[in-house]
Image (spheres, grey):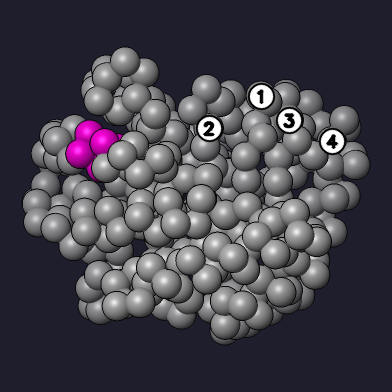
Amino acid sequence: MPFTLGYGTNGFTDHPLDVALDVLDHEGYGAVALTLGFPHLDPFADGWRAEADALRARLDALCGGAGMRVVVETGTRFLLDPYRKHRPTLVDAEADARLRFLGRAVEIAAALDAECVSFFSGVLPDGSSPSDGWALLRDRLPVLVEHARAHGVRLSLEPEPGMLVETVGDALRLRDELGGDAGDLAGLGITVDVGHCLVVEPGGVVGALRAAAPYLANVQLDDMPRTHHEHRPFGEGEIDLPLVLATLADVGYTGVAAVELPRHSYDAPGLAHRSMTALQAAWATRGASTPDQDRSLSDHPQEAP
């Protein structure tokens, strides 16, 4: 495959990070999607920099000494507020904690030589209008992108069902409003979760990946029903996995494509093994799928609980 298969640590929350990496290495993954926060790398701990340096050395030694690639994920649910999932977000009026977190994520990514830092816009708070949220994003993102650029790190915006930036089209709109490749968001990448595409993307998986291709910096792999946002193991939803992999290859993607199963830590080693088996089988049969087979039956998605 021209891209590198990985697995997200948010699906290994019952394993210490070192042990999770051992399992992924054993199963043949060449990359890890590291979600910062409990129970792995605490971005606000006093020793975060030493921990990141030690992790970099650990990653370099994996994959037979070739090194394991890493992307940094920032979707930890209760890191910033123990009572409100994901809050505050970039579309909350008061977002200092989120901005500090994303700034630290950039610094950790620089220490790890990570491919990117992936982040989301957030769900609009009650009483806030979409125009309010867009104004906050236009104000805040250039500062974050510049901070990342100064550290040699790429930021990658992930559209999420139910959030203000919900589709690849929304992410492209935001880039355009801030000047595109020549403007304040030059270098901002896009993360595509292929399962989300079944739920909210009018062009389905193929349309979303093709639209995002010039800026595609990170890919998350999972199965999902078409009716709502629920990450499932491969074979338990409606994703056409051979088509997904064929499209990634066709658009020239060479980054990390990591399995994201954040509610399945109870069977993490088994799912890591079965996911790799499914991905290898899908790659072997990718020629049997065509873009015409991809259908999007976009519904009104509900945010995953």
Nearest to the observer: residue 267 or residue 237: 267
Q: Which residue is mark 3?
A: 249
Q: Are marks 2 and 1 in contact (CB under 8 Å)?
A: yes
Measured in 3D between alpha carbons, the distance from the residue under mark 4 to the one under mark 2, in whole angstroms, is 21 Å
Mark 3: secondary structure: helix
Q: Nearer the viewer, residue 71 or 94?
A: 71
Residue 136, image x, y percentages: 14, 40
Hey, what amino acid is under mark 4? Answer: Arg
For disc 2, the marked residue is: 216
Mark 1 highlights which residue? 251
Residue at x 22% of width, y 34% of height: 142
Q: Residue at x 49, y 28 (%)?
A: 215
Secondary structure under the numbered disc 4 in the rendered image = helix
Mark 4 burial class by Cα count in 10 Å: few <14, some 14-19, many 20+: some
Identify the secondary structure beneath mark 2: strand
Labelled pair 1, 3 in contact (Cβ < 8 Å) = yes
Side of 288 where 154 appears, left or right: left
Q: Position of residue 167 (x, y in %)?
A: 42, 35
Q: Amino acid at mark 3?
A: Ala
Q: Which residues are magenta?
A: 142-146
User: Mark 4 and 1 residues: CB-CB less than 8 Å, in contact?
Assistant: no
- Mark 2, other Cα within 10 Å: few <14 / some 14–19 / many ≥20: many
- Could you tell which of marks 4 and 2 lies nearer the N-terminus? 2
Query: What separation in Å lies between label 4 and label 1 (alpha carbons)?
Result: 14 Å
